[in-house]
């Protein structure tokens, strides 16, 4: 495959950092506008590990009994991750919150090099990628699934062109996938996303809301997997410090955006029909993740840690032949909003 | 996308043929060694429609109550299909048996043209594809899932190179996916496949058995989805009449290969643990079909009839984080045979 990474090894303890030693004191950015003495790599790792702790604590609190199981792993050449999964809780049937730090090498074709250096024909480009990724699938069909992912990507200077600039970008987003629409829940969720965006740039929310609707599109169905949120990728046309703060703000918004909805819906009585519809929507979730999701398909092809990648799949899912909800039903309303994305605020 | 086909239209009645009129009297093959006055296209369509009837009748008989629901569809420019689905029967939770006849156009790069014509730079190449495709998922975890598919593919002569030869090939196979191994069942199944192969060529069974093991490989898991059977593709290096007979023999072998196993296992008592393991294996089935299966990924990308394509997915499936059966258990034995394919006869 185009990008290759080494096999992971289980670890018994969480290290202080998954970064290679040289990454902590990065002379190449010392002359930049950085407000901190440590690198963006290092501050991003710290941020996602804190976010993992915060989200897991909030999930365990709302679940009221179940605990996350933790797997720590590393790779021989540097990098590693912490996978946390809570399965068969009182509220969530499967909740995964993973952080990973990956060092790899990509072929020059895949490297979005500055145009000035493109004619140099560089060799393989070493890269660094760190991210937090989470999917939370509740049991109750009225309680929505949440997904969020924030990642930072950087290339090293190619060895045969040491003077060429490093590339970096941020990506991520938070999106909501209910089986039934409660307008107040969806409005609350989108409002929190908008507030996080508005602290940085008034164009962010409308732009990233649309990007989210476009990204989570199940093309062969003509429908989105859920009701969206925000999504952005390859973001580097803003100040690096500003984007680090923005990603941090987004990650910190996960708990206030999601947990109040869960508290409201987790004990709502439901029927077998409600559950079957939730399961059909979970089937769509599986279709999106296995067929279209870039992180999943990239991970499966490049030998990432399979159990961490596929923890995004629901515990159970369902496919009925030619199922079509009757016009005007609650199921139809959800499907309609997945086909025709709405403005919620 | 590279290959495009028109949107399908529901029909109220089964037509006698889905072939375009001109296909029934094909002057270009009148000088060939054909033993019949009608074309291979026409005889292949007749064969798969008869096989559909036979298999559906056998399934309804073994299920003992449930009936297939039929959808007939056509495309404006010719072609169409018959989709039959039995859902929530006594024995099968989902059984789909589809035939389709498709006319399309592919870009010249995709056309496996005879090397002599390759330098002519032909325009888009019209093609014809007909096939029967079926997946049968029983309820009982001791009763195996069966898949079979037989297809015939032909290109028209390109318009700007009317003298160039038509290409044709056959593909298909029948494979078994149990959640638990009963050696006698697997041996019976493979013996029937071998008998069908041996009537034509002693090299067929060993070659197509291995091809099957190689094809149904879930690369990111390092395991096959089931215990195999036979599989072949792009077969055209034998006499066309012989391959048509071979495909017919294979399709006729489905009922004797499968139904006796179902009769034996459909009422075996089982526990929730057996059911959960079956559901985990169904999850693997979904992974294979959505990530690797050529027919599925091709169909999803080219605008095929989605409900017919995805009828192969099980009614329900399950994904547990990092599930590993204990060494020596029945679940472990199945997984081991999926990781290390065995010779069953």
Image (spheres, coloured by chain):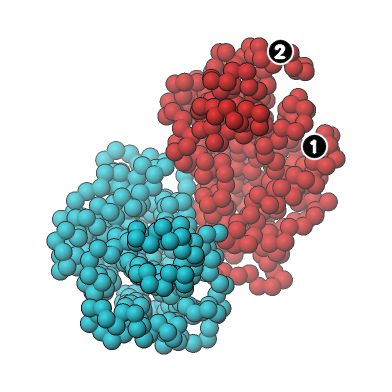
Chain colours: A red, B cyan
Dot 1 corresponds to which residue?
A: A196
Of the pair A116 and B135, the residue shown nearer to us:
A116
Depth check: give the residue in front, B8 or B162: B162
Mark 1 or mark 2: whose residue is earlier in sequence? 2
Query: From where the camera sits, is residue A267 visible?
Result: no
Q: Kindly identify which chain the residue marked by label 2 belongs to.
A: A
Tell me the residue at 76%/24% (across/down): A241
Number of numbered discs: 2
**Residue B38: percent from left, percent from top:** 31, 85
Q: What x and y, as percent, mark residue A89? A: 56, 42
Secondary element at tag 2:
loop
Q: Residue A342 occupies which quadrant of the picture?
A: bottom right
Residue drawn 45% across and 36% down?
A: A303
The correct choice, above or below, for B40 with respect to A198 in the image is below
Residue pictured at 46% horizontal, 30% vertical? A5
Res. A202 visible in picture: yes
Q: In the shown orientation, is residue B16 left or right of residue B74?
A: left
Please report the residue visible at 16 percent of the width from the left and 58 percent of the height from the top: B203
Query: Can you say whether B9 is above or below B5 in the image?
Result: below
Q: Quadrant of residue A222?
A: bottom right
Secondary structure state at the residue bearing disc 1: helix
Question: From what the image shows, is residue B70 above or below residue B185?
Answer: below
**From the viewer's perspective, is residue B35 above or below residue A229?**
below
Q: Chain of mark 1?
A: A
Pair 1/2: label in front: 2
Measure how far apart labels 1 and 2 are at the Cα level. 29 Å
Q: Mark 2 = which residue?
A: A30
Q: Quick one: B88 or B18, which is closer to the camera?
A: B18
| Front residue of this view, candidates A158 and B223 | A158
């Amino acid at each position: 495959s185009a990008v290759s990474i080494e096999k992971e090894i289980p670890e018994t303890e969480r290290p202080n950092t998954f970064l290679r030693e040289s990454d902590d004191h990065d002379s190449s950015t010392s002359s930049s506008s950085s407000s901190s003495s440590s690198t963006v790599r290092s501050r991003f790792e710290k941020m996602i590990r804190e976010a993992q702790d915060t989200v897991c604590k909030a999930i365990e609190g709302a679940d009221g009994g179940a605990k996350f199981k933790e797997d720590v792993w590393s790779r021989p050449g540097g990098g590693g991750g912490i996978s946390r999964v809570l399965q068969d809780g009182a509220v969530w049937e499967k909740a995964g919150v993973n952080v990973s730090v990956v060092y790899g090498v990509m072929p020059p074709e895949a490297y979005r090099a500055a145009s000035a250096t493109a004619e140099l024909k560089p060799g393989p480009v070493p890269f660094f990628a760190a991210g937090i990724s989470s999917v939370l699938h509740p049991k109750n069909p009225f309680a929505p699934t949440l997904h969020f992912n924030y990642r930072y990507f950087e290339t090293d200077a190619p060895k045969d062109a040491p003077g060429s600039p490093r590339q970096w970008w941020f990506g991520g987003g938070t999106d909501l996938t209910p089986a039934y629409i409660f307008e107040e829940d969806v409005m609350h969720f989108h409002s929190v996303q908008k507030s996080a965006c508005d602290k940085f740039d008034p164009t962010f929310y409308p732009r990233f809301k649309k990007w989210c609707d476009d990204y989570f599109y199940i093309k062969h169905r003509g429908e989105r997997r859920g009701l969206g949120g925000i999504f952005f990728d390859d973001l580097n046309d803003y100040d690096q410090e500003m984007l680090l703060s923005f990603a941090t703000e987004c990650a910190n918004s996960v708990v206030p955006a999601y947990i109040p909805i869960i508290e409201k819906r987790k004990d709502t009585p439901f029927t077998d029909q409600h559950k079957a519809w939730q399961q059909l929507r979970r089937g769509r979730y599986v279709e999106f993740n296995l067929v279209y999701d870039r992180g999943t398909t990239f991970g499966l092809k490049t030998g990432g840690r399979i159990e961490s990648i596929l923890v995004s799949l629901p515990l159970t899912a369902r496919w009925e032949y030619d199922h079509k909800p009757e016009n005007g039903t609650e199921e139809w309303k959800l499907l309609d909003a997945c086909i025709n994305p709405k403005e919620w605020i």
